[in-house]
Amino acid sequence: MMKVEAIIRPERLEQVKKALEEKGFVGMTVGEVTGRGEQKGIKLQFRGRTMDVDLLPKVRIELIVKDEAVDSLIETISTAARTGRPGDGRIFVIPVARSVRVRTGEEVV
Amino acid sequence: MMKVEAIIRPERLEQVKKALEEKGFVGMTVGEVTGRGEQKGIKLQFRGRTMDVDLLPKVRIELIVKDEAVDSLIETISTAARTGRPGDGRIFVIPVARSVRVRTGEEVV
Amino acid sequence: MMKVEAIIRPERLEQVKKALEEKGFVGMTVGEVTGRGEQKGIKLQFRGRTMDVDLLPKVRIELIVKDEAVDSLIETISTAARTGRPGDGRIFVIPVARSVRVRTGEEVV
Amino acid sequence: MVLDSGDTAWVLVATAMVMLMIPGVGLFYGGLVRKKDVVSMIGLSFLALALVSVQWVLVGYSLSFGTSVGGFVGGLDFLGLRGVGMDTGDGTIPDLLFMVFQLVFAGITLAIITSAVAERVRIGSFIVFGLLWTTLVYDPLAHWAWGGGWAGELGALDFAGGTVVHISSGFGALALALVIGKRIGFGDHDMEPHSIPMTMLGAALLWFGWFGFNAGSALAADGLAANAFVVTNVSASAGALAWLFASWVKGKPSALGMVSGGIAGLVAITPAAGFVDAMAALVIGAVAGILCYMALLFRVGKGLDESLDAWAVHGMGGLWGAIATGIFAVEAVGGYSGLLQGNVDQFVAQVIGAGAAVIYAFVVTYILAKVVDATMGLRVTEDEEYVGLDISQHGEKAYA
Amino acid sequence: MVLDSGDTAWVLVATAMVMLMIPGVGLFYGGLVRKKDVVSMIGLSFLALALVSVQWVLVGYSLSFGTSVGGFVGGLDFLGLRGVGMDTGDGTIPDLLFMVFQLVFAGITLAIITSAVAERVRIGSFIVFGLLWTTLVYDPLAHWAWGGGWAGELGALDFAGGTVVHISSGFGALALALVIGKRIGFGDHDMEPHSIPMTMLGAALLWFGWFGFNAGSALAADGLAANAFVVTNVSASAGALAWLFASWVKGKPSALGMVSGGIAGLVAITPAAGFVDAMAALVIGAVAGILCYMALLFRVGKGLDESLDAWAVHGMGGLWGAIATGIFAVEAVGGYSGLLQGNVDQFVAQVIGAGAAVIYAFVVTYILAKVVDATMGLRVTEDEEYVGLDISQHGEKAYA
Amino acid sequence: MVLDSGDTAWVLVATAMVMLMIPGVGLFYGGLVRKKDVVSMIGLSFLALALVSVQWVLVGYSLSFGTSVGGFVGGLDFLGLRGVGMDTGDGTIPDLLFMVFQLVFAGITLAIITSAVAERVRIGSFIVFGLLWTTLVYDPLAHWAWGGGWAGELGALDFAGGTVVHISSGFGALALALVIGKRIGFGDHDMEPHSIPMTMLGAALLWFGWFGFNAGSALAADGLAANAFVVTNVSASAGALAWLFASWVKGKPSALGMVSGGIAGLVAITPAAGFVDAMAALVIGAVAGILCYMALLFRVGKGLDESLDAWAVHGMGGLWGAIATGIFAVEAVGGYSGLLQGNVDQFVAQVIGAGAAVIYAFVVTYILAKVVDATMGLRVTEDEEYVGLDISQHGEKAYA
Ligand SMILES: Nc1ncnc2c1ncn2[C@@H]1O[C@H](COP(=O)(O)OP(=O)(O)O)[C@@H](O)[C@H]1O
Ligand SMILES: Nc1ncnc2c1ncn2[C@@H]1O[C@H](COP(=O)(O)OP(=O)(O)O)[C@@H](O)[C@H]1O
Ligand SMILES: Nc1ncnc2c1ncn2[C@@H]1O[C@H](COP(=O)(O)OP(=O)(O)O)[C@@H](O)[C@H]1O
């Protein structure tokens, strides 16, 4: 089992959700974060000076899925979230040891 | 060492915290998220139409604990967080390689 | 590859960011959380009574880095975030299986 | 009489100030509910304003101020504002202005009662209930006290609406809360205010607008208005401090308590504002602060989900104010004496007037609520309530 | 004439109330934009107030109310307030008070138009555009209607600014939006309001202030002011309910729709407030609520990013109000008859007056916007827009 | 004199408007503090209102306006409002109304000074300090200028409280900040405003209310009130633009700076509002905007945690305004000439009046603060401060 964490642009959340649904990925957890990548966010020119605006708003989506679903999931998210410009985000995959459904107490994926 | 992440109903946070304390689990990190499970949230009937309200507010609790504490922890959380209805949440267990206390710089659990 | 998660005091975020930059750690994701450690937060004396204020505001910083960078990263964060008093926070290290850059779809660190 | 431009200016402004209190109630309440219901809560106050504004010009004004039908309700003389014009009747301000000044009172009364249905009412049912309530509860009560009805005839004093506005909405809220029932999870998990600053902003607008409410009720810019203004401010301040200290005794000084106490003081002085002096206002306000706080604790203790305390603050505060008028009224201010000046009759009249309003408001509201509940359903479904009224009723999210 | 202290009192307050509407517009708009642009949005309203305040006392008042130059614009008689003093001219209030009452109207008009440039305007360019616009669009239009210009001479009625304020800003906003272009991502991803409660607070302040706007335009505390006050409230309420129900028919009853409908009703009654009665106001408001809602849907359907609907609400609402004045005016209220009383001339005058204002405002705004865009650039860079104006223009973050 | 209903109407409203400024200060400040202290911050403004309201009717009014004791303080003639009634004294408004108009001035002054103790004061100590301060600092200063005291006798002009309200609270805040000390972490880590929109809302209410403050101080609805109204708005606007541009020169145009500049302009015109004309107001406001901005930079540079800049804005703005009155006063407006009309005496009187107030306010506040600190402790514990005053003092959380 894997946890796939994607940090994406907030304005892409709807598209990503839709794409995931179409692929049958329904369960997910979403949170608001801020972040910066290697470009250190966005550089604004300002009267000759440059100002870094780092820590731009991002959305984090997390899905726990079976190992075999990871490839498809990464593909789906990264396609739907891509604009091609810096700041599109990252997807990380983290091994999960166990997963339990609170309602029933049973182990699930 | 494991990180136990529980996504639960916000209105259950107090009960869960209390239950955890009683079992001696004190340290924790809590964050606000939204999420949906397999039912895609809640379906509202509206003048003949159905409207999905997905991404309902949830609370994420994270605790880093020793491996042997995981079972008891899962049990404690899932009992305290359970209402028996869809939306009760999930608990995930993720392996942790290291844990450091900032105040002292030492490795801890 | 590892995910280094640090839970620190919000008022230390700027220092930590600066220290990380100096060491060349640029990409990061930041979120607001609350938390408590073993002291159960802060105890306020109030007319003879004691009141626990737990779940104090914290900031979570996450960086995905190569395994060999972890030590330096822990060192950097914990030095910059340290005040020496309870509540300074924790750093956790979690193994990451894969990391993908959305913009390009390629695997990166 | 001839129009007085100063009086007219003052009542114009006072009316606007009272109008602002209506969303003020919405903000006060809106801060107290959970994030998922705040649009609904503020929306209900705007809805109260809009509904009553239309009802009042069509029928409400006439039912309240038309020629009395047996002292119980006004006749239909002024239906659709027939005969209500720009000239002054027997006052110094235009009839239309008096009409609209009264309109905003009716509006805020309906807004106050929304406390009882917070976070669980169906908007359609509220519209029906609201129209029935303002017509069948508010309008008669206004007639009783101010429109030539029996209570006024009896000599019961209500300067600015302690009975008409506050007892009616407060005890109405109690009845309504009993019918609609508790919110899911009430008493089980926390339902913390989602924004205390919003509530404090609402309180600020209420305190401000209340000067129009009380001093405007002099219907003139004169010494009586000045007296009403002063006692209003004194009572509010005393109420704020009293509740603050009372909450302090029980734990910590509550800022929410302080502003609630301010409202309690404002409520209690409302019927008395044209009859008592500033020193009496200190007492009236301070007692109100403590009394309403105790009423709130009692309400919570009973597990009663009259969610935002219209009963504890407006109902009990209004009741106390009506009685206090009978105690503290002094001849020198408004021409009437109360108990302290040896006039038992006034005290008795106050008790009768207030008591009748309590009973009428409670009983009729209860019946109306039951009727609406039985026919349309007052309450949303469990899922709708869980998701919150903003999304389930309005399809809107307060904060992005 | 001799000063009337009651009239003066009322216009003093009315002026303050209209001033409060200006940040009221800012809050209304600020709630509708994304979190990253709210400081900018509220800031633009303050900027409109400050800029116009200075422009008006230096030149604007003179261009609007100076001796007419061919019916098109006022002369320079009152430059720097020369000759505008504490005594009354031919009114009952001080000249300076009339001047500042007019000032706040000019201020709010510029604030309304910021709808068109929300979340993407360069502040420096807005300052230049704003000064040009108020001087070359607002001042002449005010002169036309109120300053002795051709429209007033023609007999076109505009009691409180349906044409001068709302048509000008609404159709100006349309032109401006066409020039500046859509926000990045418009139509592609959601741009949900970041705080509906903030918008509702703004609406509350607008509704409150509008009593000063309309009833203040009587320039006296008299029966006409009372009439204006009443119809203002009635129209607002009818508009609120109409939009609420219209949105309900299409889906869910929108609370945002309800307050927008309130504003639509307020806009529409503005030119008519001194000429129609309350029953007409019911119709005017209800039609405004539905019409403006349809205009909004049309605007969205066309993919036009006139972001916060100054055009749909103020432009179309003002246009309807101007025409409605020509339909519903009754002799008994303001001395003028409309179509329903058989006076076709008034109707025609209204159409001409409003039509001219639509064209003038649209065309001149378009030209001004083009000129500023060509010289300074109206719009921030893509990165600045993405980051948000609060940070990129002001270096500030709304919420920590 | 005989009561004038227009004057009375205006002062009734003006009083309510000034009252609204008090929570306006709370919101202005509340937006500037961190999320953990906002309930406390707004709460302090309500507390100032409530405390002073009670103190004023009991003793404050008498100490300020009772028969002068040596020009320094009023006698006890009006204790508990004895002899302050509904009839007019030698004015055209009821005595009670004059009393309550003065009350709200005392209230806002105490609210302004809370800047100095933001995010670190013990509520109990603030109550004691506040009562002492309003009694021993505000009341004498009000007496000096307006109650028959030495400054008024000397001919020092203070139309609406530049000295009494702003110098006193501003320099008082400076002293208080020195005694209570810096917030933990001040200068070390960011303490960003938690809600700039809240501060802008506060600024809007302040700007609005200030018309009551300044134009109300004419105590009549007349030409002088109109002049005060106009110059108030002009100075505010000039101040807003000046600070905006000044911040622009140093970096980016700050929206927070713009509203702060507006307040600075409002403060500076306060003492001058009845004595100068609109063109002078442009200068007074613009200078205030720049001066107060520089004072703020100076304060920050010195590492002084007078947290929300009551000193920089109210203290320095008030000082400048007092002096500016001596420069720009023109006979035609208020009957007094300033330096520009060759009257050196007036200038000197202004400097003396303001200087004395600066010294008195600073010194006495310093002593009072020291006394309270030594006896009760002004400041919360380090842990309480870290957790925030909302939880540690009130047991409340602003936002859920
Ligand atoms: N090494 C990293 N560790 C954690 N988060 C990262 C890392 N790199 C990028 N991110 C997250 O991904 C977001 C987008 O980054 P990215 O698309 O990589 O920006 P860029 O296109 O500038 O490289 C960042 O805002 C941050 O939240
Ligand atoms: N596969 C998943 N990956 C990540 N989060 C999930 C997943 N499934 C559920 N969740 C989280 O758990 C919460 C509750 O889901 P759950 O109780 O499973 O709902 P349901 O009862 O509808 O299955 C969701 O809101 C979401 O935050
Ligand atoms: N076992 C744990 N699991 C998860 N988070 C923890 C744990 N212990 C501490 N934390 C996080 O670290 C923060 C700081 O805790 P810490 O510095 O350990 O406090 P203390 O100094 O009281 O031990 C907490 O607020 C919490 O967010």
Image (cartoon, coloured by chain):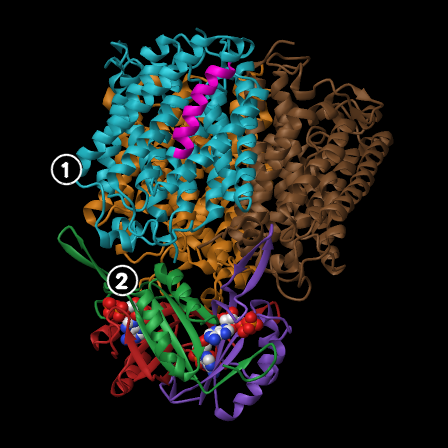
Chain colours: A purple, B red, C green, D orange, E brown, F cyan
Examine the rendering and report whether any part of residue A84 can be seen. Answer: yes
Examine the rendering and report whether any part of residue A60 can be seen. Answer: no
Q: Which of the labelled discs sits on residue C83, or is there none? A: 2
The picture places residue E56, in percent across and down from the top left corner, at 66, 28
Ligand 2 visible in quadrant: bottom left
Is C101 one of the magenta-colored residues?
Answer: no
Asked if labels 1 and 2 touch by Cβ distance under 8 angstroms, the answer is no
The boundaries of the magenta stretch are F312-329
Q: Secondary structure at mark 2?
A: loop
Q: Most extreme residue toward the left, as rendered?
A: C48
Q: Residue at x 58, y 78 (%)?
A: C102
The picture places residue A73, in percent across and down from the top left corner, at 55, 85
What amino acid is labelled 1 in the image?
Thr
The picture places residue E144, in percent across and down from the top left corner, at 79, 28
What amino acid is labelled 2 in the image?
Thr
User: How many C-alpha atoms fall within 10 Å of the one at disc 2: few (<14), some, or many (≥20)?
Assistant: some
Query: In the rendered view, would you say B19 is above or below E96?
Result: below
Q: Do marks 2 and 1 both belong to one polypeptide chain?
A: no
